[in-house]
């Protein structure tokens, strides 16, 4: 079987690997035996000796935030499910990993399936779920086989199935393969897909997964990496786990860096441990020789772009505890959810795409616009029409047919999508256009001014 | 199974469903104890992997198994880019089109693959269940796909089930050779 073998260098000294601790070790394979030799399923044993509510509290106290993109507090999400409401509960794992720039779950699924399974069993025990599906995009055909085999091994050893390790807790886990549609990463689209339908996202309210999820029952949807963290919270204790991160955002986070850097790859770091500048220049070895930084998309393709040299005024606590305003460069922005939100973008899925000074921003935006136009599910008119319209305009500009009002038209279209759709794809597809136009206006006007109106 | 046989699938060929296929389908359906309809995608994958594409007989067979009308299976096929109503090449080369791969030269790589296997580099599938562009001899299909979640080792391509990373233009002929029968 061939799967990615690149991007797995030894950890950088600034890294702290929990999720990727074993994956990068030579000789570490996907067998149960190997996993057990590395302390596997010890957290599960601990969990089964706890009360389910205590596990939820531990995850809350650890300040674990979802790693799929939205960054929702995981413990809070779980507590929306009433443990004994008499309804069936389901746990669905989001392994659709399709936000451009993101490539962390692929390594977990291919190289450490038992870590995920252990996280799933603990999480299902905490929330009274007895049936779980791991939704894996079909472009990971080996992962589906590897995870399914691991589930069967775990079942044979009593970690999955009936009466897990004699606790009386039952859980079945199955793998479900997607079919190459980005929208299946959106949690309610994913549930529709799992029900055998087109992946049209559901409107919230009322269809919050925790209330009306899979088969209209209370359902938890979590990202692959998020559920792996649960195991480490129990292993380390909430306090130590939370301490690694920033207030309200605990543990480690995997940042995936791609584009124009010398050493692309994934880097697992304590939340907030590095700035954007440290990430690019220390960890990733800077840009290629002779090139300068031009732009960074910090959290998956939907995140708003940052321009090299851009300055921000942020509020910071001084040594005396008083809040002061200070000006920082984009390279000094800390790579955590709060800091990136404070400068108008997001940490999202952790996918950092770096572009150097040889890149044409109209081309870059056009690439993203084509992605969104292709992936819009077509349910909501503003998104279906708008994403295609934006893509047609940027393509036309590149083909030399730009007109002076194109930037304004692009902005107008984008502004009329965000906030007017059933799911957050609307925002995801308009943020690139809005931010590229704001940050690089001169490139768009120069490219569009070739023809007279 | 030869290309022509797959191309000429018709309703009459439901008989091609072997007991082994039947057993695989039952196993998949059993993984969805709450709703058989959930087995729609798995059965479409099984059918396409086994017979090359999902013709009318497949639609009808799956619809009956999961308890929906044929149109509800067709609407699923036409929504998801992975599924096709007509056969593709024996080997399918899916080159990533999205940003990190594009920055690393994926457009050039895709063109090289097209030239190496005889697919028109300017043709593309129009979706809705259409197969990817395929060489006249039926050996290869080449298409652009969206981000394959391996952006750190761009440019990448998924060839049948295997991932190829950091593809350089000069690697293309040797890669193609591995898949030539
Ligand atoms: C358009 C769109 C695409 C998404 N794609 C993914 C994805 O590929 N993987 C993922 O885990 N979450 C994705 N999400 C986020 C999910 O909807 C959901 O928030 C997440 O799975 C919840 O898990 P978490 O709380 O553990 O992060 C996407 C959201 C949107 C709006
Ligand atoms: S952009 Fe090609 S794998 Fe992500």
Image: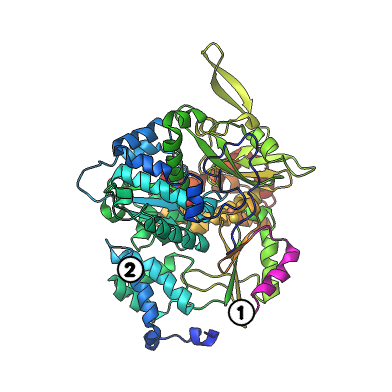
Label 2: how many residues lie within 10 Å, few (<14), some (14-19) or many (20+)? Answer: many
Q: Chain of mark 1?
A: B
Give the CA distance from mark 2 to mark 1: 32 Å
Task: Work out whether residue A403 can be spotted.
Answer: no
Figure quadrant of residue A307? top right
> Which residue sits furthest left?
A86
Figure quadrant of residue A269? top right
Q: Is residue A352 above or below residue A32?
A: above
In the rendered image, residue A71, in percent from the top left (x then y), is placed at 45, 39
> Which residue sits furthest top?
A320
Q: Which of these two is toward me, A267 or A305?
A: A267
Q: Which mark is residue B29?
A: 2
Left or right of A406 in this view: B23: left
Residue positioned 69% across, 45% down in the render: A263
Residue positioned 45% across, 65% down in the render: B80
Label 1: how many residues lie within 10 Å, few (<14), some (14-19) or many (20+)? Answer: some
Q: Chain of mark 2?
A: B
Cβ of mark 1 under 8 A from ligand 2: no
Give the extent of the magenta segment: B165-181
In the rendered image, residue A219, in percent from the top left (x then y), is placed at 31, 48
> Which residue sits furthest right?
A290
SS at badge 1 = loop
Q: Which mark is residue B139?
A: 1
Q: Which mark is residue B48?
A: none
Q: Is residue A134 magenta?
A: no
Q: Which of these two is toward me, B148 or A295?
A: B148
């Amino acid at each position: 079987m061939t799967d990615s073998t690149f991007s797995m260098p030894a950890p950088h000294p600034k890294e702290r690997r929990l999720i990727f601790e074993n994956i990068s070790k030579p000789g570490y394979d996907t067998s149960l035996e190997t996993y057990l030799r590395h302390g596997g399923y010890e957290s599960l044993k601990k969990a089964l000796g706890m009360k389910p509510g205590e596990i939820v509290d531990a995850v809350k106290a650890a300040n674990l935030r979802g790693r799929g993109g939205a960054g929702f507090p995981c413990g809070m999400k779980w507590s929306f499910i009433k443990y004994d409401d008499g309804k069936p509960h389901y746990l669905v794992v989001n392994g659709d990993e399709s936000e451009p720039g993101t490539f962390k779950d692929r390594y977990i699924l291919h190289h450490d399936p038992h870590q995920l399974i252990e996280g799933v069993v603990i999480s299902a025990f905490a929330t009274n779920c007895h049936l779980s599906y791991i939704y894996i995009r079909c472009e990971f055909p080996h992962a589906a086989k590897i995870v399914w085999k691991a589930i069967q091994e775990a079942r044979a050893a009593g970690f999955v199935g009936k009466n897990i390790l004699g606790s009386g807790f039952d859980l079945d886990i199955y793998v479900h393969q997607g079919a190459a549609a980005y929208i299946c990463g959106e949690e309610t689209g994913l549930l529709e897909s799992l029900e055998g339908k087109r992946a049209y996202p559901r409107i919230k309210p009322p269809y919050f997964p925790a209330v009306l999820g899979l088969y209209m029952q209370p359902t938890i949807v979590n990202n692959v990496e998020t559920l792996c963290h649960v195991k480490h919270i129990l292993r380390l204790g909430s306090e130590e786990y939370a301490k690694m991160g920033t207030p309200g955002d605990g543990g480690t986070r995997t940042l995936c860096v791609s584009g124009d850097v010398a050493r692309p790859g994934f880097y697992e770091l304590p939340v907030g441990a590095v700035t954007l500048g440290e990430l690019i220049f220390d960890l990733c070895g800077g840009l290629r020789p002779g090139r300068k930084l031009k732009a960074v998309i910090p959290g998956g393709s939907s995140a708003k772009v940052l321009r090299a040299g851009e300055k921000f005024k942020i509020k910071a606590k001084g040594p005396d505890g008083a809040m002061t305003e200070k000006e920082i460069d984009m390279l000094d922005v800390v790579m955590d959810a709060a800091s990136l939100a404070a400068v108008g973008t997001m940490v999202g899925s952790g996918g950092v795409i770096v572009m150097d000074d040889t890149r044409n921003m109209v081309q870059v935006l056009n690439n993203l616009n084509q992605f969104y136009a292709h992936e819009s599910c077509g349910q909501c008119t503003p998104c279906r029409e708008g994403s295609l319209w934006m893509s047609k305009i940027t393509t036309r500009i590149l083909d030399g047919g730009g007109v002076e009002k194109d930037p304004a038209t692009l902005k107008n279209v984008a502004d009329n999508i965000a906030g007017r759709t059933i799911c957050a794809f609307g925002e995801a597809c308009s943020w690139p256009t809005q931010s590229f136009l704001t940050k690089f206006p001169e490139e768009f006007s120069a490219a569009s001014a070739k023809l007279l109106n | 199974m030869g290309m022509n046989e797959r191309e000429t699938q018709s309703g009459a060929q439901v008989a091609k469903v072997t007991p082994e296929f039947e057993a695989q389908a039952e196993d998949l359906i059993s993984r969805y104890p709450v709703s058989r309809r959930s087995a729609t995608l798995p059965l479409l994958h099984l059918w396409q992997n086994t017979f090359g594409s999902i013709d009318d007989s497949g639609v009808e067979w799956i619809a009956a198994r999961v308890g929906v009308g044929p149109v509800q299976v067709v609407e699923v096929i036409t929504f998801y880019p992975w599924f096709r109503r007509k056969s593709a090449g024996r080997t399918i080369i899916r080159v990533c089109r999205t940003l990190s791969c594009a920055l690393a030269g994926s457009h050039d790589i895709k063109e090289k693959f097209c030239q190496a296997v005889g697919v028109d580099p300017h043709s593309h599938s129009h979706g809705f269940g259409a197969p990817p562009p395929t060489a006249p001899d039926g050996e290869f299909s080449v298409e652009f796909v969206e981000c394959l979640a391996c952006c750190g080792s761009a440019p990448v391509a998924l060839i049948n089930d295997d991932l190829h990373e950091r593809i350089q233009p000069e690697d293309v002929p040797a890669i193609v050779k591995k898949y030539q029968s």
